[in-house]
């Protein structure tokens, strides 16, 4: 890879912060003990784990005993949902949304095969701006509903859902509430200490400058819990398996850093994002923002460029070392654009040409300017190639039309 | 990221022959905006009956653009008869290969060429004449049959990779499976091993279940003073209600799974799941 990389794909993964890496290293070398051991050598690791647990709990306003370490966000999601279904073995209804991450979406869609029981899964629709209808949500809840699983913030658009209010509604009906918060934690303030009704919350380390292979499931004190991985007594019997010590220490450090950088994220990073977004929408005709303008993470922007295809855009950007992602069909290996954009009703003319930039505290104004310099000619270039682009848009041509309901 | 060859990258980043020929001899348009890729191909026939010039415009991913660019290079200097012989495999080969999920890009190139030649000759596009199998991407049985035959495709997934058929709502998967069996059977008449797995209709399934219940299961349960009633069938889920001595029997769950479910799986369908409905 050549010298310069402009990394704006932080919703996919983030760089491990140098401070985090430094904190982790000793636990790969001299401090390699097992925290469960009787000897002092292993036991000293236990003290460091406790400290990391506290740092993580602090970031979200939780107590230490509400933090369970897992291997990733996906494991946290599965643990929460299976736990709720075991808590209410007679309830067979799950409420979620159409725009969840595959970790929740695919799990819910396959829950019958996994449990051997038939379930009803309600996937709540979103509007054109990616927002949920709270009344519709309330109406979807029944006496048979075991759990609601709704993401805190969407990975593709950054749109934030009102999970605190939704959790309250669920609680009043005796329904457990889970939120996949992997995109939200570290980017926006989260405080579960104030009368929160959220029962489960998933965190993924590598989304906030810790390493891959570490996740957290927050389980509210008093929420019934059944483990997903059963084995040793680790995590008080709530998750078997020897602790991923170095990664846990790193996540603790990353959470401390994220707490200290929250303001920077919500001022400077937000301003960079806005500058990038505004610049693109102003200089490139037939471009549009996907997702609600304000109810959104400070670091994410999803912009569609009509009549061009996302993969082609990404590969051109790649030549300049610019890293972003797309909701187009071709980038996913499937033939249809992202389920999030489709759920929002983004027209096909735009869905195939969507590009997501997700920033971090490591991005600079120079990098934003670099993208604003490089991207407009790429779009113009690809539009010159496009049969649909003739100065303005003539609409669809071609022999085959899309007749299905997708 | 996709593993594209240098040739694909070169044709993507430096596409040859972009544009529309104003006084084209033939013009072919395939794909649509909704489908995620589309190609317009124009060519001009010289006085010697050979293709003098060819140009394209493509909306699509890198491999779609590269396939189009490659195609325009390949057809120049050919007679129409020669050009008609170009297959999607030839286009892929010219580019040093394409990822299997992207083979449909080369198929699109070939179809645009056929459409352009048909346009020149003033005849209907041959591949569009068949039965429309995939409504999402507008793919006919003729296109699917040809892809199965020429590229030796064996699964629905491969057909989707090559033609896009079945990549949307998936309603046509059964039909594609039938086409695969048909074409492959035509190819090897003697090989009759490949039969489509028998699929029961709901009515057939319910009748069979009732039959097994009446004939074997109920008489067996009645011997011990119990009984069973079929309440509902939903897909593979068989809802039953236990009666008589079964209601209070501690072993009733074992009976349900180890006996009733096992019998039904043996004699009706091995994916069935029996569940008790409590009043």
Image: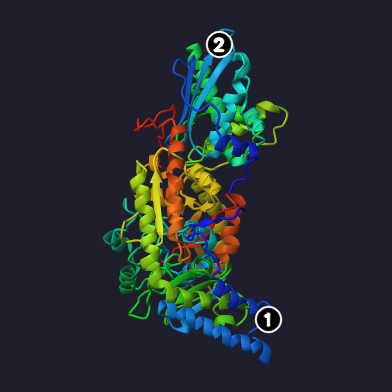
* CB atoms of marks 2 and 1 within 8 Å: no
How many numbered circles are shown? 2
The residue singled out by tag 2 in the image is B46
Q: In this view, does A272 lie to the left or right of A294?
A: right
Q: Seen from this angle, which residue lies furthest top? A: B47
Q: Seen from this angle, which residue lies furthest front? A: A366
Residue visible at 58% across and 39% down in the picture:
B102
**What chain does mark 2 sit on?**
B
Q: Residue A154 carries which label?
A: none
Report the quarter where the C terminus of chain B lies: bottom left
Residue B50 placement: quadrant:
top right
- Establish if A136 lies above or below B19: below
Return the residue nearer the eye: B80 or A82.
Answer: B80
Q: Seen from this angle, which residue lies furthest right? A: B190
Give the class, few, some or many, for how many residues have Cα within 10 Å of label 1's Cα (few <14, many ≥20).
some
Q: Position of residue A122 (x, y in %)?
A: 38, 58
Q: Where is residue A396 in the image (x, y as percent from the top left)?
A: 38, 31
The residue singled out by tag 1 in the image is A32
**Both labels 2 and 1 in a single chain:** no
User: Dot 2 lies on which element?
Assistant: loop
**What chain does mark 1 sit on?**
A
- Establish if A57 lies above or below A280: below
Return the residue nearer the eye: A258 or A239.
Answer: A258
- The reply to whether residue A90 is in sight is yes
Residue B219 placement: quadrant:
bottom right
């Amino acid at each position: 890879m050549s010298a310069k990389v402009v990394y704006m794909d932080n919703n996919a993964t983030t760089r491990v912060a140098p401070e985090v890496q430094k904190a982790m290293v000793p636990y790969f070398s001299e401090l390699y003990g097992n925290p469960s051991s009787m000897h002092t050598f292993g036991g000293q690791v236990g003290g460091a784990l406790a400290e990391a647990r506290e740092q993580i709990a602090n970031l979200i306003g939780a107590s230490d005993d509400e933090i369970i370490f897992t291997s990733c966000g996906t494991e946290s999601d599965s643990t929460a949902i299976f736990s709720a279904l075991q808590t209410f073995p007679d309830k067979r209804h799950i409420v979620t949304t159409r725009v969840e991450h595959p970790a929740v979406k695919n799990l819910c869609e396959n829950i019958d095969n996994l449990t051997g029981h038939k379930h009803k899964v309600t996937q709540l629709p979103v509007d054109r701006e990616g927002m949920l209808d709270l009344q519709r949500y309330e109406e979807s809840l029944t006496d048979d509903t075991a759990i609601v699983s709704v993401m805190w913030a969407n990975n593709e658009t950054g749109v934030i859902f009102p999970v605190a209010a939704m959790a309250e509604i669920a609680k009043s009906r005796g329904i457990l509430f889970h939120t996949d918060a992997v995109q939200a934690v570290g980017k926006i303030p989260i405080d579960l200490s104030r009368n929160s009704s959220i029962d489960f919350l998933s965190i993924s380390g590598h989304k906030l400058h810790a390493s891959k292979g570490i996740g957290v499931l927050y389980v509210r004190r008093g929420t019934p819990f059944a483990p997903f991985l059963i084995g040793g007594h680790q995590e008080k019997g709530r998750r078997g398996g020897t602790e991923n010590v170095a990664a846990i220490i790193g996540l603790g450090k990353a959470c401390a850093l994220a707490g200290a950088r929250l303001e920077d994220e919500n001022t400077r990073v937000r301003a960079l994002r806005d500058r990038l977004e505004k610049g693109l929408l102003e200089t490139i005709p037939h471009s549009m923002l996907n997702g609600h303008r304000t109810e959104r993470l400070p670091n994410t922007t999803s912009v569609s460029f009509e009549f061009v295809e996302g993969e082609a855009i990404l590969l051109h950007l790649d030549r300049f070392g610019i890293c972003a992602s797309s909701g187009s069909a071709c980038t996913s290996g499937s033939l249809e654009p992202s389920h999030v954009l489709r759920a929002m009703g983004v027209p096909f003319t735009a869905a195939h040409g969507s590009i997501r930039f997700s920033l971090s505290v490591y991005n600079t104004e120079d990098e934003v300017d670099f993208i604003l310099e490089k991207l407009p000619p790429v779009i113009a270039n690809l539009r010159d190639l496009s049969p649909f682009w003739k100065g303005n848009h003539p609409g669809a041509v071609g022999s085959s039309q899309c007749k299905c309901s997708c | 990221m996709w593993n594209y060859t240098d040739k694909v990258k070169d044709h993507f980043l430096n596409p040859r022959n972009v544009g529309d020929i104003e006084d084209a001899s033939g013009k072919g348009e395939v794909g649509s905006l909704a489908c995620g890729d589309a190609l317009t191909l124009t060519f001009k026939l010289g006085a010697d009956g050979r293709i003098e010039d060819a140009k394209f415009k493509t909306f699509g991913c890198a491999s779609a653009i590269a396939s189009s660019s490659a195609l325009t290079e390949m057809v120049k200097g050919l007679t129409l008869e020669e050009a008609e012989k170009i297959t999607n495999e030839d286009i892929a080969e010219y580019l040093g290969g394409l990822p299997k999920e992207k083979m449909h890009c080369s198929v699109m190139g070939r179809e645009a060429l056929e459409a352009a030649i048909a346009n020149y000759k003033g005849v209907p596009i041959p591949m569009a004449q068949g039965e429309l199998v995939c409504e999402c991407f507008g793919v006919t049985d003729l296109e699917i049959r040809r892809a199965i035959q020429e590229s030796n495709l064996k699964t629905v997934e491969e057909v989707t990779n090559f033609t896009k058929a079945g990549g949307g709502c998936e309603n046509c998967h059964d039909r594609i499976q039938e086409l695969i069996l048909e074409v492959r059977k035509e190819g090897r008449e003697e090989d009759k091993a490949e039969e489509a797995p028998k699929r029961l209709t709901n009515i057939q399934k319910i009748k069979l279940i009732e039959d097994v219940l009446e004939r074997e299961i109920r008489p067996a349960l009645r011997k011990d003073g119990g009984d069973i009633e079929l309440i509902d069938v939903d897909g593979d889920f068989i809802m039953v209600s236990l009666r008589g001595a079964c209601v209070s029997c501690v072993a009733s769950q074992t009976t349900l799974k180890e006996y009733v479910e096992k019998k039904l799986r043996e004699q009706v369908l091995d994916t069935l799941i029996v569940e008790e409905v409590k009043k």
